[in-house]
Image: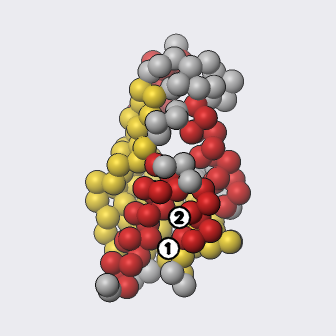
Amino acid sequence: MSELQKNKALVRRHLEEAVNQCRPEVWNDVMAEDFVLHHPLVEPGRTSYAAALETLHAGFADLTVEVLDLIAEDDRVVVRHIERGTHTGDFVGLAPTGRRYEKHGFGLYRIESGRLAEAWMQEDDQGYQQQQQQLFG
């Protein structure tokens, strides 16, 4: 397997196992201790990222990220994805509605020494906010 294929497999494993299966222990294998996330709604760092996903999974137990495209070059991997979930639990103080949401986005991951070192996320926040209005009234 080439280095580019290994990098793509690392990102896919992160999304499919740690995120979709809600198994944050996978990060011990795939994520650097000093991982940095660049996202407007989440503080940088591995701990903040884990807390954000825990909050999402609490509110949207069926949360999944579908990988549409995965492209690698040098130490970077880009993923185009769709995040989906059904509001089945408490989410930041809001009672469950049973409604679904869908959010399209891109992630750029930097790989260092075979681990996720840094990530930049860009998502359709406007579309998500419109869906939140429908979800939460």
80 to the left or right of 128 = left
38 to the left or right of 92 = left
The image shows residue 7 at horizontal and vertical percentages of 41, 76
Amino acid type for the residue under numbered disc 1: Arg
Q: Are marks 2 and 1 in contact (CB under 8 Å)?
A: yes
Nearer-the-camera pick, 5 or 118: 5
The image shows residue 103 at horizontal and vertical percentages of 40, 39
Q: Badge 2: few (under 14), some or many (20 or more) residues near its Cα, within 10 Å?
A: some
Kindly identify which numbered label has been placed on residue 137: none
The relative height of residue 120 versus residue 130 in the rendered view (above or below) is below
Amino acid type for the residue under numbered disc 2: Ala
Residue at image position (46%, 36%) is 62
The relative height of residue 49 versus residue 28 in the rendered view (above or below) is above
Give the CA separation, mark 2 to mark 1: 6 Å
Residue at image position (54%, 48%) is 22
Query: Could you say which quadrant of the image residue 54 lies in?
Result: top right
The image shows residue 45 at horizontal and vertical percentages of 68, 61
Q: Quadrant of the N terminus?
A: bottom left
The relative height of residue 50 versus residue 74 in the rendered view (above or below) is above
Q: Which residue is mark 2?
A: 119
The image shows residue 28 at horizontal and vertical percentages of 62, 68
Residue at image position (44%, 70%) is 10
Q: Earlier in the sequence, mark 2 or mark 1?
A: 1
Q: Residue furthest left?
A: 69
Residue at image position (43%, 44%) is 64
**SS class, disc 2:** strand
Q: Which residue is mark 1?
A: 110
The relative height of residue 76 versus residue 60 in the rendered view (above or below) is below
Work out whether residue 130 can be spotted. no
